[in-house]
Image: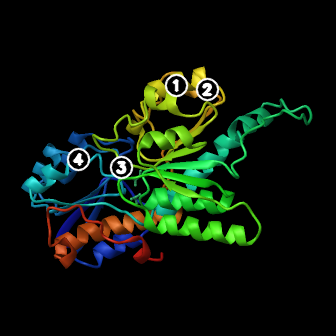
Amino acid sequence: GKYRVVSTKPMPGTRWINLLTAQDCRVEICTEKKTILSVEDILALIGDKCDGVIGQLTEDWGEVLFAALKRAGGTAFSNMAVGYNNVDVSAANKYGVAVGNTPGVLTETTAELAAALSLAAARRIVEADQFMRAGLYDGWLPHLFVGNLLKGQTVGVIGAGRIGSAYARMMVEGFKMNLIYYDLYQATRLEKFVTAYGQFLKANGEQPVTWKRAATMVDVLREADLISLHPVLDKTTYHLINKDSLAIMKKEAILVNASRGPVIDEAALVEHLKANPMFRVGLDVFEDEPYMKPGLAELKNAVVVPHIASASKWTREGMATLAALNVLGKIKGFPIWSDPNQVVVFLEEKSAPPL
Ligand code: GLV
Ligand code: GLV
């Protein structure tokens, strides 16, 4: 291969490797056993000659690494993730390195996990599972693991981009929930969907569903029975959910986060969960991954999973493929890369490759 492309982790499938090797690239995959690579580890991987890197959301892609990549002749970096809060894009641009992410292919998979957490929290699935396995079930009782009915309640979505909108559709259509959402942008297609579905229900003699675009996030916090967070993580969304915002939410509300951990002040959340046993939470992400804040693991009203929202085979293979295409596209000068100052949204949802 004429070009050297490094992947900091083995990634699912072989398509991504085949794409690169078919186009003059030698692919080197780091097989280091430790889960999270340090900046020093990655510097060693980049070495003296490296044209492009596929990296992971657990890595700190800043000034040091992009300077090293430039020195090694590199021009391309892709995160194998849609979120790129771990990447200093302006540092990358300063060193002439283009940055890509992998949107689209994980939209439905991530939304489905947020839906799974919603149901697990609403119906206390994990608590009930632990109860069964502990041999505590000694007969049906009218009050055993009573949870929340979603139908007719209001789902609140904070951040109605691709993932937030897909989640909203699932909850509205699947469980006949009303929608309230907050986003800087109007989610026109989502609004049209809920309107049409409401008309369909009405025509069938059922209670129609409704939607509302909230003027402020506070309206969502106040009105929703189930809230799912889907913003990007940046300065404006850091600790978006804190002591004050939790205090506004209903005492029996459910909060779901499959975006980024620091969107929630996790210590404040632990206190809130302790003080409000009927308040429940489903978390895929944590403020200091891989750690949980003290106390969270002991709380029965929390369902916790280890950042697996995009973890379906189809999606993970798709993410690897997009990351490879991002790097290849820059190295080979595909026209998509004409603006190096942009994080490239390489493929839109609809054109995601069937794998
Ligand atoms: C996963 O967390 C991603 O951003 O793709
Ligand atoms: C990610 O794909 C998003 O914009 O929600």
Q: Amino acid at mark 2?
A: Leu
Q: Where is mark 3, residue-wise?
A: 232
Residue at image coords 43%, 35%: 241
Q: Helix, strand, or loop for circle 3?
A: loop
Upstream in sequence: badge 1 or badge 3: 3
Near-viewer residue (348 or 222): 222
Q: Closer to the camera: disc 2 or disc 1?
A: 1
Q: Where is mark 4, residue-wise?
A: 61
Upstream in sequence: badge 4 or badge 2: 4
Upstream in sequence: badge 4 or badge 1: 4
Q: Which mark is residue 299?
A: 2
Q: Amino acid at mark 1?
A: Val
Q: Local crowd at mark 3 within 10 Å, few (<14), some, or many (≥20)?
A: some
Upstream in sequence: badge 3 or badge 4: 4
- Whether pointer 2 and pointer 1 mark residues with C-beta atoms closer than 8 Å, the reply is yes
Q: Which mark is residue 242?
A: none
Q: Quadrant of ligand 2?
A: bottom left
Q: Amino acid at mark 3?
A: Val
What is the quadrant of the N terminus in the image?
bottom left
